[in-house]
Image (spheres, grey):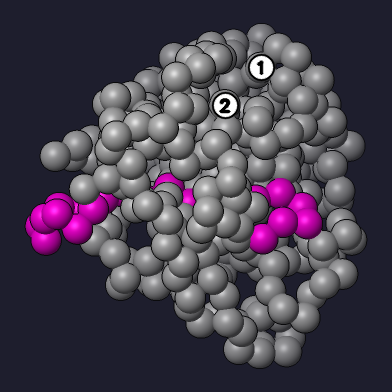
Amino acid sequence: MLEKMKFLMPPEDVYEPVSHAGKLVRVDYASESYDEEKRMIEKDALVYLPYGYGASEQKRYPVLYLMHGGGGNSDELFGGLEAKTTLKTMLDACIESGYAQSMIVVAPSFMFEGNEEARTGVEAACALTHRFPMEMKWDLIAAIDEKFRTFRTREARAFGGFSMGAETTWSVFCQCLREVKYFLPMSGDYWIKEVQGGASRAKETVDCIVDSIKESGVAPEEFVLYACTGDKDIAYEAMDTMLREMAERKEWFHASPDPDSGNFHYCLKKGGIHTYVDCYEYIYNALPHLFDGVTRK
């Protein structure tokens, strides 16, 4: 039996504006298509800077990278520079109250100009999510570390995503374990074998994940997974099946309902469905457990 991490419903006041609010800025950076064409492309990310960023030239911050779902872009999660969603307000409140430590949050996109078919085509989008880890490893991390005062260590980096962003998260997990320690896949399984392969080809899918861990040389004690979904979510069956298969690989995944022990945690929201409202609640549940050992000063 796979014991689950307790899901906490965020209090209503976490979505109310606070006096010490952070800000959003847009960052442009260069990348490439990482396919046979190897063409140079221009990318951007929306970046949340916590309240007080810039007040000290010595203070550094951990970084949480968050990827949108299918059909979205870098504006999706925050609602653009205008912060039209509740994510920024939630981060402000969590940091001000001390529920979460002060952090930079980066919202990039696996999309880029010239791949419009990926907005509606699952196979085309999947090709981009599987190539995104190279952009993450070689371009995005470097751009963020150069632009902002980050810790520049894997222990101070987390990557999460919702829906197709969760599929991206599994891809980043398998290709960027040496660069990132914490992972938050939300409402999505890994499509390395086929679409929703977490359900139809769970054993083979998890074999690929385990092989990636072996190849990385990163020990089980050196990464942490917080996998979240809802039991009414369209992604539930595939994700649940894959996570249960992972829990059987006890040498690699130390499942625990305690979010501060083990390396593999399954958070299930009763009645949760496939919406960004649920996604923000999953982020809320993971926030206080990220960046253990990274200074809060």
| Above-or-below relation of 12 to 26 | above
Estimate the spatial distance between the alpha carbons at disc 1 and disc 2, rounded to whole Å: 9 Å
Of labels 1 and 2, the one closer to you: 2
Residue occupying the point 19% across, 58% down: 54
Q: Amino acid at mark 2?
A: Glu
- The answer to which quarter of the image holds residue 179 is bottom left
The reply to whether discs 1 and 2 touch (Cβ–Cβ < 8 Å) is yes
Q: Is residue 38 above or below residue 174?
A: below
Determine which residue is flagged by label 2: 281
Residue 54 visible here: yes
Instruction: Pinpoint residue 170: horizontal percent, then vertical percent.
Output: 63, 47
Magenta part of the chain: 53-73
Query: Who comes first in sequence, dot 1 or dot 2?
Result: 1
* Quadrant of image for the C terminus: top left
Q: Is residue 253 visible in the rendered structure shown here?
A: no
Q: Residue at x 57, y 28 (%)?
A: 282
Front residue of 238 and 214:
238
- For residue 269, which numbered disc appears in the image? 1
